[in-house]
Amino acid sequence: MNKYQQPIILIVDDDETMCKLLCEQLKEEKFKAEFVLDGSDAVNIIKKKEFSLVILDQNMRIMNGDKALAEIKKYDSTLPVIMLSAQTDPAIIVKCIKLGADDYFPKPYEYDELIDSIIKYIRIKK
C-alpha cells in the first residue's frame, strides 16, 4: 500500500443532509469521505473496508453511537473514533470516552476544531 494513500473517513449519522455536508467539507480538506446512516451499517462496513477514522453520531434509530462505538472498538481498538452529536448529557459523553472515543464534539460543531481533531487522530495506513 502506498504510504501516501489518501485517508478515508467514515461518517455515521442518521441525518443524510449532515452526512453529505460533512463529506463535502472533508473533500475540500483533501480527505476521502463516505457515509452510512446507522451504527449497525458502520460496524458491517468497517469489517469489510479499511478506514483511517470514524466520525460517529450518538443518537441514531437502529443502533446508537455508544453501541456502535463499542462494536467498532471490539473489532479494531486502534481505529480513531470522533463522536459528533447533539447529545450533550455529561454521562453519555463520559460513557463514550470510556468506550474508546478519541474526541467528542457537540452539534453544532466548530469546523476548525473538528478538522484539527481529525488531523490529530487520523490513522494513515502504511
Image: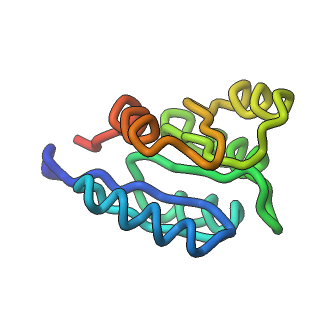
77 relative to 93 in the view: left or right: left
Residue 109 at x, y percent in the picture:
56, 45
For residue 2, above or below residue 13: above
Residue 73 at x, y percent in the picture:
62, 39
Q: Which corner quadrant of the image does residue 24 belong to? A: bottom left
Q: Which corner quadrant of the image does residue 77 belong to? A: top right
Residue 29 at x, y percent in the picture:
26, 53
Question: How many numbered circles are shown?
Answer: 0
111 relative to 3 in the view: left or right: right
For residue 86, above or below residue 96: below
Which residue sits at x=15%, y=44%? 3
Which residue sits at x=68%, y=48%? 85
Which residue sits at x=49%, y=40%? 79
Which residue sits at x=44%, y=45%? 111
Q: Quadrant of the C terminus?
A: top left
123 relative to 94 in the view: left or right: left
Q: Nearer the viewer, residue 56 or 26?
A: 26
Residue 4 at x, y percent in the picture:
13, 46
Q: Nearer the viewer, residue 11 or 107?
A: 107
Q: Nearer the viewer, residue 72 or 15?
A: 15
